[in-house]
Amino acid sequence: MSKRMRRAAAMGGVAGLLAVAGVTAGAGVAVAEDEVRFSARDMVVPPGTNPRLGPWLDSGVADGKIVIAFSTKPLTGPAGDGAGLPAGFTVDPLHCTTRAGVVAVYVCQDGSMFPEIRVPAKVADMTTVHWGFAYVPKGGDLAAGVEAARTAGSRPVDATHGTGKAVVKTAAHAALNTIGYDMPTVPVGRTVHHRLRFHANDAGSLRLGFRVSNGQESGGPGGLRLKNFTAGPGLSCRVVEDYPHLLSTNVWCDVKAGDHTIDYDVVGAADLRARRIDALTSYGIYDWGGYDYDVVRKGTFSTLGSQVRPQHFLLARDSSGWLSRYFGTGEAAEPFRPADRLGDGWQIYDTITPLSPLRDDLTRYGDDVKPSAATRGRGDLVARDASGTLWYYDRHFASGSYPFAPRVRIGSGWNAYDRLVGAGDVDRDGYVDLAARDKAGVLWLYKGTGRFTGARFKTRVKVGPGWGAYGQLAGGADVTGDGRADLLARDKAGVLWLYKGTGSGTTPYGTRVRVGAGWGAYDQLVVAGDLTDDGKADVVARDTTGVLWLYKGTGGATAPFAGRTRIGSGWNAYNRVF
């Protein structure tokens, strides 16, 4: 049974019938276009669904009546033998009328909406609803049509009457259709042979697609090409797309019952990245209910290539309190995509800082978007309101929508500090930390706990005095490439200084190193993570005219940034970039 038939059946009524008009008539049979011809189709349905049962219009215009009779038997015996539905089944006539004096017979005016059978959620496998139909032309003998429908199984099938059945197959039955995967690792620049082996307990349709495995950096399974598809007997396949994309269908097959193989080659392109890839198969045996009832299985293989690095993004708040997000591209020439607006209400905060650079979601399939260990270090935010209360926004995975969980109150008294800056994982314990400078110029470190309830930070640790000399602080990432989170500080003369991380929670920074002068031209400074896909943390800076500049990281301690590159203008529309 083809997917085309499944989709048409799911549409119901004339819409479904017309979906296959012209291809369902018997092969080699020539009919006049205006001759009314019907045919019945057997269906396989899942429990808990509501299939509509009735004949398919193959040609002509049906302006008469269609009689449909339901039975628990094949309608080959006397009229009324087995009339009705299996136990627990009910029927909604919809646009049809119930025929008085007989059981489970319905008269439909034009076939636009056949009766709907309510299949119970709990039902025995292979329970069957039999039905017969008869077409009564306009002005014809309706009583004779009723009799013909009730005994349709005992009469030769023709264009105006016949029988069909709906067989219920349970999920356990569907699971008897099994599949195996032979999928070796695919290295960059190599061609590797893969094979699917499956046992089709039932005829059905198979779809094959690919996706990046759960829990990896986002993106589709790029860098692969599929070729040389071969399918054994009993399969009718077509290649929809030979380049795997995220959740796309690459191969679609109609399958006869039996044991089958599909062979194909996978080519690793020169730009292949190292990933885990799921080969996702969906096998459908049902003619009603859509793809939700397909048997979905996956096999997983690895690709060997360059490292997949996380995409970073930038947030910006305007004067009305709207928060906008700029997804990264990984390209130095144009590091950000156009903005998407996340939400308003952020004007209540006088300070907002990510605890580490903001990173895109990991690949996630399912509905669980709660913060977890996998979301730590991907850009949790803290925000302080005018009363001095500090709030914590956990990152969570939200499939591209709002990236933060509802805020959690940390505590009051945070207006004792005139600078709050995300410090990244300073002591390398796996949890992100916060640096805070008080009004006397003393810098304090609040080490993260990694908890999702209770205290988010440990008791503060004094870093040292003298930090009041700086007008800006920026941190959260490893600038020098040694695996330790560093801190940038710009003094009031516009000189930028680098404080290399030590990895210690008590003396987190080494002696400062001069980066260079001229940084007083910027009123916003952000350590944004790796924006150029080279594995080195970059900095963006906004000047007082609203132009945003990119400083590519070099990974060096003495000259940590290359010359600046202009990103674009108009960024003075925002009062905070982070």
Image (cartoon, rainbow, N blue to C red):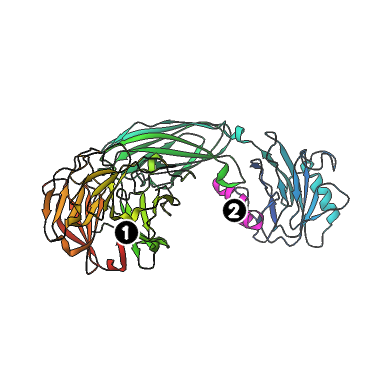
Q: Which mark is residue 337?
A: 1
- The label on residue 105 is none
Which portion, as a residue range, is magenta?
A: 1-20
| Above or below 513: residue 351 | below
Contact between marks 1 and 2 (CB within 8 A): the answer is no
In three-dimensional space, the C-alpha distance between marks 1 and 2, rounded to whole angstroms, equals: 43 Å
Taking the magenta stretch, the answer to whether it contains residue 8 is yes
Q: Is residue 345 visible?
A: yes
Task: Judge left or right: residue 92 versus residue 399.
Answer: right
x and y percentages locating residue 505 in the rendered image: 25, 38
The residue lying toward the viewer, choosing from 380 and 314, is 380
Q: Residue 334: horizontal and vertical position, in percent? A: 25, 59
Find the residue positioned furthest to the right.
Answer: 101
Tell me if residue 1 can be seen: no
> Which numbered marker is on residue 20?
2
Where does the N terminus fall, quadrant-wise?
top right
Amino acid carrying label 2: it is: Val
